[in-house]
Amino acid sequence: MKTDVFSTEVESLTSDAKNYVEQQLPQYIEELRELCLIDSGSYHKPGLDEVALYLAARMRGLGMNATIIEQEEWGNDLVATIQGAGSGTVLILGHMDTVYPVGTGAARPLRVEEDMVYGPGVSDMKGCILSAIYAIEAMLSTNHRSFGEIRFLCVSDEEIIKRHSLGLIQEISQGCQAVLVLEAARANGAIVSARKGAAGYTLRVKGRAAHTGVEPEKGRNAIVELCHQILQFESLNGWREGLTTNPGLCSGGIAFNVVSDYAEAQIDLRFIHPLDKIDTEEVWHQMIRQNKVAGTEVILEGWPHSRQPMVCTPQSLTLVDRAQEISRLLGFSVQHVMTGGASDGCYTSSFGIPTVDGLGPIGGLDHSPNEYLVKSSVPERSALLAGLIATVEA
């Protein structure tokens, strides 16, 4: 969409989209209620497949070409496309998996309290995927087809380390001029222009078992050495701008009266610059050679599928500026922020595609019993997304 007619055409489109979604808001809530009843934790294939079927049917009802990508072990993924009259190709990227165990949907069904919607997955991200569907529906229902091609990808494994969808994300994002990621807008309404990279590690210590009362001197305590290494690792918090490290899960030993011969910890690393990750790993490997407990062996293993930072490139910043202009047309303002949380936008950004995140409705407290979505934000955020889709050019 050309800049000289930007305001007129986009103002019409976004106004129409906002009005449409406002009228459909009761239906949106009922659909979200139905989706949140489906348990779709990352390891629960039956529920994930049910969500994929629901969304595929919904997208086909809009005239989209929706394909379910069958997975033998993991939840199925979903890709949908639709052609418009414009020139740009945009990828809308979301995930269907949640972190909640089976039974949560029935135990904690969606509830609405004034302007707040509570339930498992309302913001992360069933409500956000649904808002994008309503954004597309609003564009089509009001005869706004200035987009070139919309690709809509919903994966089933975003919340876990073991990924099967990375090749699919890369494949579907090729040839796109923009990626719009559906994580919820921040609590203050901000969208996300940058994210830290994220990497995981397992720190293993092998020691020697012994009876703690009879001959403790013959043991080599793996737990003590692990604690020493964790404290060394923790000393690097903040040694580079924005860098954080955290031991999130530790285990070791078999009984209180046995010198532990094995212990391990899982370490989370967040970083702004890719080189910081490399440098931190180098320092860590120097540290593990500095044993506190003689005779123990320390091993550091990096996990696969680390996420590079989502960088706010000049091209991504252009998308941010456009989002801010569209929001002004809609009568509100948005800021853009960096966040430490990773998303699949980290991958698309690393592929060199302009990426903006936080384009769902306002929500928060993800992964908790108090996860929420702000109901009144759904129409305006759906309209903002529609405006961005319409203004992506080849």
Image: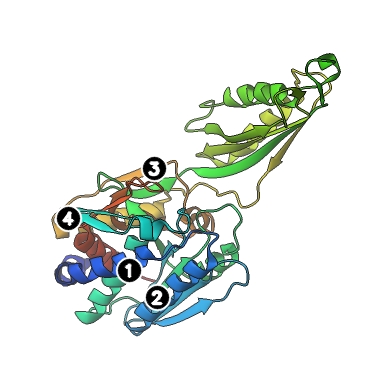
Amino acid type, label 1: Glu
Marks 2 and 1, Cα distance to the nearest angstrom?
10 Å
Amino acid at the residue labelled 4 = Arg
Q: Tell me the residue at 78%/29% (across/down).
A: 261
Q: Name the residue: 51% across, 27% down.
A: 238
Element at label 2: helix
According to the picture, the residue beneath numbered tag 2 turns out to be: 54
Residue in the foreground of this view, choosing between 309 and 127 = 127
Secondary structure type for disc 1:
helix
Give the residue at mark 4.
328
Q: Earlier in the sequence, mark 1 or mark 3?
A: 1
Could you say which disc has been placed on residue 34 in the image? Answer: 1
The mark found on residue 338 in the picture is 3
Kindly report which numbered mark, 2 or 3, lies closer to the viewer in this rendering: 2
Label 2 vs label 4, nearer the camera:
2
Q: Is residue 392 above or below residue 327?
A: below
Q: Quadrant of residue 90?
A: bottom left
Q: Secondary structure at mark 4?
A: helix
Mark 2–mark 4 distance (CA, rounded to whole Å)? 34 Å
Q: Secondary structure at mark 3?
A: strand
Along the horizontal axis of the image, is 159 left or right of 34?
A: right
Crowdedness near tag 3: few (<14), some (14–19) or many (≥20) residues, C-alpha within 10 Å: some
Crowding around mark 2 (Cα neighbors within 10 Å: few <14, some 14 to 19, many 20+) is some
* Residue 129 on image: x %, y %: 36, 65
Amino acid type for the residue under numbered disc 3: Met
Residue at the image position 62 percent from the left and 33 percent from the top: 250
State the CA–CA distance, disc 4 to disc 1: 33 Å
**Is disc 2 in contact with disc 1, using a CB cutoff of under 8 Å?**
yes
